[in-house]
Structures are given as C-alpha cells and as structure tokens.
Image (cartoon, grey):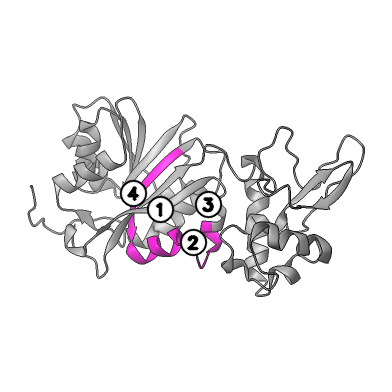
Amino acid sequence: MSVRQRPPQRGAVGQHFLRSSRLAADIVGQAEVARGDLIVEVGGGTGVLTHALVRSGATILVIERDPALAARLRRRFDRFTSLTVVDADAAAYCWPRDRFAVVANLPFAACGAILAGLLGDPLLPLSRADVIVQWEFASKHAAVWPATLRSSHWRAWFDVSIVRRLHRTAFSPPPSVDAAVLRLTRRPQPLVLPDLGAAYWEFLASAFASQTSIRRALRSSLSPLQLKRLAPALGFALDAQPRDLERVVAAQEVVPGDGEHRALGEHDEEQHPLVVREQPLAPGRVRPNGRRRVRDRHA
C-alpha cells in the first residue's frame, strides 16, 4: 500500500488529499466505474484518486479550482487522452449534458455548495455520485430521521446512503474530523417529475421554514379531511414536523378520481404526488375537463 507523508499542497479551503493509492482504488471499485463511463472528479488535488480513475478506462473530466494543482495534473496525466482537466469552480460549473457519474473527494468547506449545484436540478443526466465528505455531513443527509431540507429534495430522485467511513489519518493534511463516502444513486422511477424540481424545492423550503406541523403548514393546500385520509395511508402523524417525515412529498399527495379532487385513500398507497404516472400532472395544471388539481401555493 502506498502511504507516505506529502508536503503541504495548495488547494481549496477545507481540502484534504487522499494519501493512499490503494484506498483510492477501493473507492473507485466500489463506485463501479466501468470502461467508457463519463466520470467527473471534483477537486483533483494531488491526483491520487485521478490515477485510480484513469486506470479504470473511463473518460475522466477533472474540475480543479486551483490553477497550480490543475497544471500539475495536466503534466502528470498528459499522455492519457481520456482525461481532461479544467480550471473551474465546481459550485458554479455547467455540468455535462451527456449521462455522467461523479467520483470525488470534495473540499469539506465547499461540499454543500457543490452538491447543491449538482443535485439541485434533477434534469441533469447524473446517474450516480460517490463523494467523500465530512462524516457529520454524510450522516445528517443520509439519515431517514430527522430529515433535512436538502436530503428530502435529493431523495425524490436519488437513493442516499453511506458507503464507508474514512478515518482522518487517511488524508494529508489530516482534517479535525473523520470523513465518509456518501453515495447518491438515481432512482429507476423518480418520486417527483424531474421537470418539477424547482417547484418541489419551493414547496419543501416553505414547509421546513414554517416551524409548524404538516397539518398547519399545508392547510392552504389541503383540506382537513384530505390530510386526515393521507396521514394513516402514508404513515405520518398530523402533528408531525417536516423533519419527522422521510419524504415530505407524501404530504402533498392529491390524486385524481372520477373528475373530482380527492385525497389519497386506502387503495392508493403506492401513488405519489407529482410522481411519474401514465399521464403525470403538474401542480395547477388544467385537466382536459377544465378542472384544476389542488395546488400548493408554495409550489
């Protein structure tokens, strides 16, 4: 195993570089990177993870904010035509239009902003992301309870899990906390239509900001009777807070029936709001009979 002390390197604030080439190879292997895949690495740094990615046979796009580190990566991997290094801030980067995956050791101080840009638009053709982040950040967003605003949004299109824990000594310079490999895998069937990503974020942000129960937060959108029917069908309490729900999406569930609006009932447990259906409807979209479905004013 190649582990050695490296001299301090420049990089983004909060960036800690992997020390072990074997560990990098394990992470790439667990990410199931295959020959021909398009992989984006954010923060190439000293190239330990980059080297493992290149050996996989995938096409690699490295986004490195530090010009000196980017230049070093170009010199080191200049003979590999499958690798491209760009000087850019990943938090504001225009992601590929072709299907891609992300394998990266993210700068701890910027991981929230980077993932917000990467996962905020479900229309991006992102299939999967295996990213190294702080342990606290990973455990908070991978937890079923309490839910966070970000994880509630992400889970509409991705399964979120922790692959492994990494001790702080695996990095140079070592951070003050341990890290984790956080995995986000695209769902075969999304819970919310991807083109409603912005509307769903607004809905969630309003619910989380309300600091009140789901019953009160949604009273302008759903009637007491509708919420009363939804609660037992979807397994949440009427006095639950948004953070208490694994998927806040359940609270906006209204499905069509016989030309009228009705709350989800005992035979509709598998339906989801704004979800992919044979003929999906967006909030407020007019039906063929001229009626409008119940709309949440925050969506």
Q: Quadrant of residue 122?
A: top right
Residue 49, label in figure: none
Q: Compute the Cα span from label 2 to label 1.
A: 10 Å
Q: Is residue 202 left or right of residue 144?
A: right
State the extent of the magenta-drawn residues as a range: 127-151
Callout 2–callout 3 Cβ contact below 8 Å: no
- Callout 4: SS: loop
Marks 4 and 1, the one that precedes in the sequence:
4
Residue 184 is situated, as x and y percent measured from the top left of the image, at 43, 47
Marks 1 and 3, the one that precedes in the sequence:
3
Front: mark 3 or 4? 3
Number of residues whose C-alpha sits closer than 10 Å to that of mark 4, classed few (under 14), some (14–19) or many (20 or more)? many
**Residue beneath the point at 76% across and 63% down:** 227
Residue placed under numbered mark 3 in the picture: 154
Residue placed under numbered mark 1 in the picture: 161
Front: mark 2 or 4? 2
Q: Compute the Cα span from label 2 to label 3.
A: 12 Å
Residue 144, label in figure: 2
Marks 2 and 4, the one that precedes in the sequence:
4
Residue 112 is covered by the magenta coloring: no
- Callout 1: SS: strand
Residue 296 is situated, as x and y percent measured from the top left of the image, at 77, 56
Residue 131 is covered by the magenta coloring: yes
Amino acid bearing label 1: Ser
Front: mark 1 or 3? 1
Residue placed under numbered mark 4 in the picture: 65
Number of residues whose C-alpha sits closer than 10 Å to that of mark 3, classed few (under 14), some (14–19) or many (20 or more)? many
Marks 2 and 1, the one that precedes in the sequence:
2
Number of residues whose C-alpha sits closer than 10 Å to that of mark 1, classed few (under 14), some (14–19) or many (20 or more)? some
Residue 40 is situated, as x and y percent measured from the top left of the image, at 36, 39
